[in-house]
Image (cartoon, grey):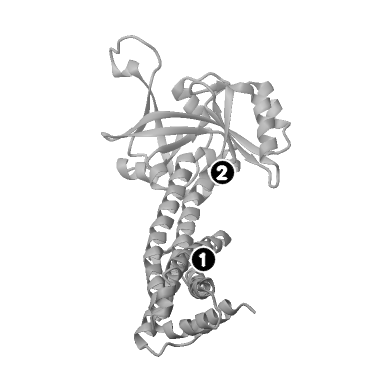
Amino acid sequence: MNVSLYIAKRYLRSKSSNNAINFITYIAIAGVILGAGSLFIVLSGFSGLKDFTLEFTSVVDPDLKAQPAEGKSFMLYPFDVEKLDNIEGIASYSKIIEERIIIESQDKNALAVIKGVDENFQKVVSIDSVIDHGDWLDQKSNQIVVGWGISNDLSLGVLNFTKNINVYVPKPGTGQITSSKNAFSTVKVINVGVFFINESLNETYVFSSIDLAKKLLNYERNQISNIEFKLKDGVDIKEVRAQIQTALGDKVILKDRTQLNDALYKMLNTENLVVYLIFTLVLIIAFFNVIGSLIMMMLDKKQSLSTLYNIGATLKDIRKTFFLQGSLMSIVGGIIGIIIAFIVTLLQQHFSLLMITPTLAYPIAIEIENFFIVFFTISILGIVASKIASVRITESLINNI
């Protein structure tokens, strides 16, 4: 039997004759429990926020997007379309035209990006699910659908024929501009819907038919800006991506959803790391209580330690006893904290205890990796704290009774 482990368990369960030491020990254990629980809840909360944020990108971003390798557009010829149609892994794809524009209504104007889409766009992304009010546009019309931010800035309603809405885009070319008519291409439009995705997209995009965008930009028949793809369920994305790249050649660059939101993913991952480091620092401070508790226990058990030493226990064995006691205190406290935090997160998921708005509960996600992160962090810090405390035991401390 491991004598050091046995004694460590006894010390962990038993109470000291000194109430002050018991109080310090309880505080140390409570600090580990609260620290572990807090870290788990914060990581789960951040996971929920991350999923909540990325949920919007899954609505409006395709599985794959083909962008021009050079310039703002490329040519998609009928033989290119035939090649794409022959790729089994593609469920649907939509041809897109994008360009910066000025949208104006009754002396109010805003900078935006027009996104001309074809009839397949609704099959590629779930755009219908983000239409806040109004309807989706008709392809054979001058209808547009704007974001909530643009609608608010320009005071645009839905199907308000009393307000003129004009879309402007600079004409390509060189030379001196003599009049605004020669400088801009313009088209009158009618707003039929307002979408709500997030603050950035709400103030950026104006959807239109691809024919309207092509007319506004004076594009050629086969000229487009992007192609957005929806893939069939269960297909190998890498394989389908390679087939699309072969079909379209070097004139396009393919990006998946993660690459399209590269800056967003980097920001979320950085914030997650910063939050973890901040709470780890809080845990490090909490583990000073563990060190203090172990040192007080050593002083309280000094006579017992001397007896152990005199009957043959080595200094290494005695140090190991308190090292194991501190490690067990940290691990047990960490497990209890994780269990309590897990129950709290379940209650939040099912009963929405904390609300951001009257209709929106604080998002929280329980991920397996968070269990391991918290347990690993608590275990490492507990082992380090226990090691720091245990090396305080010396022969002079044991013999000085």
Mark 1: which amino acid? Ser
Residue at numbered disc 1: 379
In front here: 248 or 157?
Answer: 248
Residue 6 drawn at (x, y percent): 58, 81
Which residue occupies the extreme top position in the image?
175
In percent of the image, x 65 and y 34: which residue is there? 241
Precedes in sequence: disc 2 or disc 1: 2
Asked if residue 196 shows in the view, the reply is: no
Q: Is residue 85 above or below residue 159?
A: above
Which residue occupies the extreme left position in the image?
107
Q: Is residue 358 above or below residue 119?
A: below
Under tag 1, what secondary structure? helix
The quarter of the picture where the N terminus appears is bottom right
Q: Is residue 81 above or below residue 204?
A: above
In front here: 228 or 32?
Answer: 32
Asked if residue 89 shows in the view, the reply is: yes
Under tag 2, what secondary structure? loop
Residue at numbered disc 2: 125
Foreground disc of the pair 2, 1: 1
Q: Which quadrant of the structure image shows residue 228? A: top right
Q: Which quadrant of the structure image shows residue 390? A: bottom left
Q: Marks 2 and 1, how far apart in space?
A: 45 Å
Mark 2: which amino acid? Val
Residue contact between numbered discs 2 and 1, judged by CB atoms under 8 Å: no
Locate residue 359 relative to residue 123 in the image: left or right: left
Locate residue 367 relative to residue 234 in the image: left or right: left
Residue 401 drawn at (x, y percent): 39, 83
- Badge 2 density bin: few <14, some 14–19, many ≥20, Cα 10 Å: many
In percent of the image, x 71 and y 38: which residue is there? 89
The total of numbered circles placed on residues is 2
